[in-house]
Image (cartoon, helix red, strand yellow):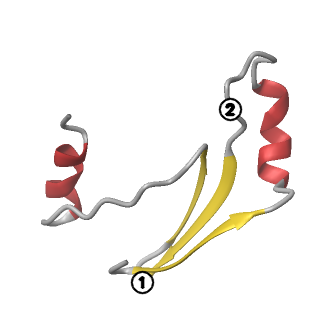
Amino acid sequence: MKNVDWLGVVRDSSLVAGLRPMWSRDAIFVPLHYVVISKECVVEVLAENVDVFRIGGSPPQAAPSSLSP
């Protein structure tokens, strides 16, 4: 994956545990805690799963394109 150096899953995440009381007891999924390391930054994500899509252009150009169906 270009510009993504590493993607990992945090097990027994204190972030997920701290947010758990805010979730409905009927929650469909329990998110996992992902850490993504790129050349530019570190991003933490709480999600059921993570997909990476490459869209050309600068971040301001690519962001609106990522929202289109």
Q: Residue at x 85, y 53 (%)?
A: 14
Say left or right for 44 vs 4.
right
Question: x, y percentage for residue 6?
Answer: 54, 79
The mark closer to the camera, 2 or 1, is: 2
- Amino acid carrying label 2: it is Phe
Q: How many marks?
A: 2
Residue located beneath label 1 in the image: 39
- For the residues labelled 2 and 1, the Cα–Cα distance comes to 31 Å
Task: Measuring from the top left, give residue 56's x and y in whole percent.
Answer: 14, 65
Residue 49, placed above or below residue 52? above
Q: Which corner quadrant of the image does residue 62 belong to?
A: bottom left
Disc 2 target residue: 29
Query: Horizontal and vertical percent for residue 17?
Result: 85, 44
What is the quadrant of residue 3 in the picture? Answer: bottom left
Q: Quadrant of the image for the C terminus?
A: top left
**Does 38 sit left or right of 60 as displayed?**
right
Q: Which residue type carries mark 1?
A: Lys
SS at circle 2: loop
* Element on which disc 1 rests: loop
Q: State left or right for residue 15 relative to residue 1.
A: right
Residue shown at 68%/42% (left/top)? Answer: 31
